[in-house]
Image (tube, coloured by chain):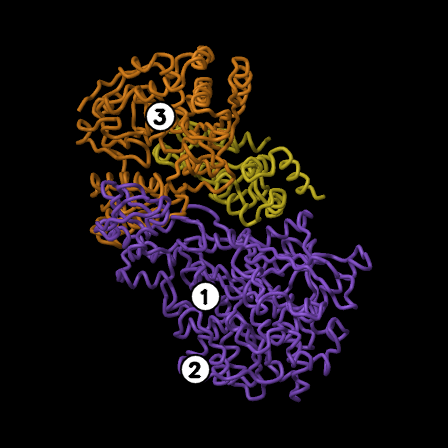
Chain colours: A purple, B orange, C yellow
Amino acid sequence: MINLTINNIPLSVEEGTTVLDAARQLNLRIPTLCYHEDLCIAGNCRVCVVEQVGMRNLLASCATPVRENMQILTNSMKVRQARKNIIELLLSEHNSDCTKCYKNGNCELQTMANEYRTGNHIYTDLIPLKHNKVDVSSPSIMKDDSKCIRCQRCVRTCAELQGVNALAVAHKGHEMKISSFYDKPMHEVVCTNCGQCINRCPTGALVERNYIEEVWNAIYDPTKHVAVQTAPAVRVALGEELGFEVGERVTGKMVAALRRLGFNSVLDTDFTADLTIMEEGTELLTRLKKALVDKDQSVTLPMTTSCSPGWIKFIEHTYPNLLPNVSTCKSPQQMFGALVKTYYAQKKNINPKDIVSVSIMPCTAKKFEAQRPEMRDSGYQDVDYVLTTRELAIMIKQAGIEFLKLEDEKFDRFMGDSTGAAVIFGATGGVMEAALRTAYELVTGREVPFENLNITPVRGMEGVREASVTIANVLPEWSFLEGVELKCAIAHGLANAHKLMAAVESGDANYHFIEVMACPGGCLGGGGQPIPTSPEIRNKRAKAIYAEDEGLPMRKSHENPEVTQIYEEFLGHPLGHKSHELLHTHYRARKRY
Amino acid sequence: METKQLSRVDLIFKPEGKEIELLKKKLNEDGDDFILELIDSGLKGRGGAGFLTGLKWKLAREAKADQKYVICNADEGEPGTFKDREILERVPRKVFTGMALCGHIVGATKGYIYLRAEYKYLAPKLKKCMADLNDEFKKIGLEFTLDIRYGSGAYVCGEETALIESMEGKRGEPRNKPPFPVTEGYLNKPTVVNNVETFVNTMIISEIGFKEYKKLGTDHSRGMKLFSISGDAVKEGIFELELGMSLADFVEEFGDGDTKAVQVGGASGFCVPRKKFKETIIGFEGIPTGGSMKIFNSSRSMYNVLHNYLDFFQEESCGQCTPCRVGCQQLLLGIEAVKRRERPSSYLDELMKLADTMKISAKCGLGQSVGNAFVSIIENFREEIVY
Amino acid sequence: MSNTENFVKELADKHGRKRESLMPILQEVIDARRYLSDETVVNIARELDMSAADVYGTASFYSFIETKEVGQYSIRLCKTIVCDMKGKEAILNAIEETLKIKIGQTTPDRKFSLSTTNCLGWCHKGPAMLINDEVFTELTPGKVIEILENYMNR
């Protein structure tokens, strides 16, 4: 243990603790900007500087390990003067047009400027001197360099968590900036649209492309039937934006709010999550049969999931040779989109051209996915607008809805019913767990051998996880699976996916089934979720997801009566002709830069 | 305070020839003894920062690792400095055997010289010299090989951790310290980074002995130093002088009789006005320097001088930390605004506070030293900035 | 395989495919081709298993690694204080008039590019400039024109 004093208060902390963390143990908050719990230490914004008694220079508390007998002052005159100057410097290179900013009210620089009352703007405004651009080329992410304070959180996110490196630091000195490859538009580079950079940007330099006005216009248009679907992870995070504690489930209130906003049908992406299990599970079993029984060399295993559009764009750029490994299933959002303008339109007797299909997603990559040219199997763009959890919260606030006081309501019928298996799609490992619950029972006629259906080995926040299930006493039609040890792997965060796929590519990994989610924690940590994010926040959301699952009467996708119904009435059977047409897709190789 | 008369020394450029012999002798002696001698000699790094060389080697020697590195910092970019170029042109063997000696002492088998791009024309000769020495090292049973790496035009890579980052194929951005290179340097292995002139000094100490070496200089500034003299001087070029002289003596010798100010230590050093020449000692007790001495006579505008420095820094800052990246731009725009009457002269006081903030809060030595020239020029030549 | 692809592959074979091989590779590209094209960066990134944006970001840090097309001869005139005091401006004018280009520009025949640079380490013999790796000191307007004419005839 190391003994030191902070603001004259003695304390002992473990060796290797930073001054910043030591101060936190005394409930002392030192302001930070470039620091982020999810990322490696940069030590470059310098707002966290503190004084060590006897030393001329200040120390960056985030980057300085404690030493024996250190005497630290976090708020001395010297510290305050320097910190105030540094904040002023940041403001001088920041477009401080706060009232026009999308991040107004949720900006760390704004909060800090407010705390330090730095209203004078003593330094020269650098913004008119710079040739900053706003990049609106991407359907998912907007990049406004005039608001960038060069903290490099986005760069570290893109590199460390995602292994994508679409963003890099370029040039030096006064020209230093965050740039894509040769400063090309974001839409043209390897960006996966995952939005993790947005979740960690302290200012408004990186935000989602919002479609709030477009959705309002659709709602106001009396000739349109606006149908909305909501992804599983939205319901465990939306509350954070609207006055609830982290980890509160607000499913019923969300449904009520969507109705009050004026959506004509309030439906659930969870329905197509269950459908995904039927299609993807069947696809996996088919691939296994071809490999094990027919000894078909052309079958590619392991099969990977395809729900996460960030993951899809990543593999298209990074491992185009492994695209045959990816399940051909569309994501639940796109299955929903294709069905809402076909099956749902038929059932409700609405002309599909009058349907505006809106989805509420924890995700920014879904915005890109909805605009992919191949996502028009209904004859129209299957999903017209994708809003993030954050955008929905803004709409609810705009409509003056007192969210906290809403009575819970239920989703509409037809494509509104779902199971616990669908809900857990929102957490890393959830698709795997849902698939195992169904596949095991399909093949053996028995429930998965885990207490209360909770397949705990696939849960958790470890970056790459492995699990295996030995299939025994199978039903006669599945005899080829008797005794087979089904090997599974799970990765979340694209950097982890990168590692896992490298092992697959080199042949070091012999899995049958791999679940990949682009975002840390899975969709609950998605790029469209409330800001901030941290390991603690993601854990609380995960807890909420599993609680939602346990609270539902049905917890296995194949038990969803609406799923049975849609196969009977419309689709035929999994992987059938109609399924292929509406629920499956194809991928393309993309350039890697 | 102890001062020395200005006196010329001729150790560094003495003809080469004895290097391998000296090295061979050291191979048979106890390394700890030489470290003690080196510490006792008082030799401080000749790049400008002035860390005790013997201590640096000691820390690297004590570090446990399967591989260690010796790097010669030949990224001489401080405006007004050109002594390392001269050393590399005239006595490269002394530099390289100094590196080999360091390798032997600290337990490193690999040495790199990091040569600035601006000196690339030196490379063919240096490579030949290194190849010869690699053979000679082998012959005397020393496992040490020399290799060359190049900069690509970035002043900040003279900072040792930025240099290491650059060698690792990254942007030359200084690291957070600790850890220091002696424990985690190139490829995270213990690494000694020393300036060209420092390595030559270690060879001189091993030749003449630390006792003889200590006779040169003062208590705080042992030895001699190469000075790069330029500007309004009667004699420009490289001069090897004993440390500890007064600036008045220096100006007497080199100035053109009309010296208004001397910039000691380059753009990151201090500007000393005529009235302070007498009291200013060149050395660690006064103004430490990597050897850049720029002399300005009364025809020079100190506004132009400061403007030139600030323009230099705003370009050469690596850009990662706020105080340096934005601070340099603000200082430059600030003096321009005052000059143009767009800001009152009192704005200079605001900028002085900013310079102080940069000194104490920037991440590396570069950012911390931008304020030196700024503060010393504003303090002494304020009227030239305003009018 | 394209010309660039082969070229980069050879460089990677020579210098290695680790991150620390990057600078030697970039430097050799500059020696051979004077600037770094986006196609070259994509190839380097592939060989070294790095992101292209990261290679670009690293390259753009260094002033001697051009990421925009430049001429066969890069003129870098020192603009640091002592060269400035010794008449850099007159040299600059002489170059600009001779080549009919300004700082940051390349001649239409792609032979010369002009830029200024920081201290070249020849303060005692300023003004100084580099043309590619070759250094010229104690310049006068007459001398610099002569040097340029020499290069024009190369």
The label on residue B47 is: none
Secondary structure beneath dot 2 equals loop
On screen, residue A69 versus residue A415, left or right, reads left
Q: Which residue is mark 3?
A: B53
Residue A367 visible? The answer is no
Q: Is residue A54 above or below residue B31?
A: below
Q: Nearer the viewer, residue A511 or B229?
A: A511
Q: Could you tell me which residue is drawn at 42 percent across and 63 percent down?
A: A532
The label on residue A399 is: 2
Q: Which residue is mark 1?
A: A540
Q: Could you tell me which residue is drawn at 60 percent across and 45 percent down?
A: C49
Q: Could you tell me which residue is drawn at 69 percent across and 79 percent down?
A: A564
Check if mark 2 and mark 3 are on a common chain: no
| Amino acid at the residue labelled 1 | Lys
- Across and down, in percent, residue A112 comes to 32, 60
Q: Nearer the viewer, residue C68 or A25?
A: A25
User: Whole-Å distance between the Cαs marked 2 and 3?
Assistant: 69 Å
**Residue depth check, mark 1 versus mark 2: number of the one nearer the observer:** 1
- Across and down, in percent, residue A302 comes to 69, 57
| Amino acid at the residue labelled 3 | Thr
Q: Is residue A36 above or below residue B50?
A: below
Secondary structure beneath dot 1 equals helix
Check if mark 3 and mark 1 are on a common chain: no
| Amino acid at the residue labelled 2 | Ala
Q: Is residue A284 above or below residue A79?
A: below
Q: Could you tell me which residue is drawn at 78 percent across and 58 percent down?
A: A292
- Marked residue chain, label 1: A
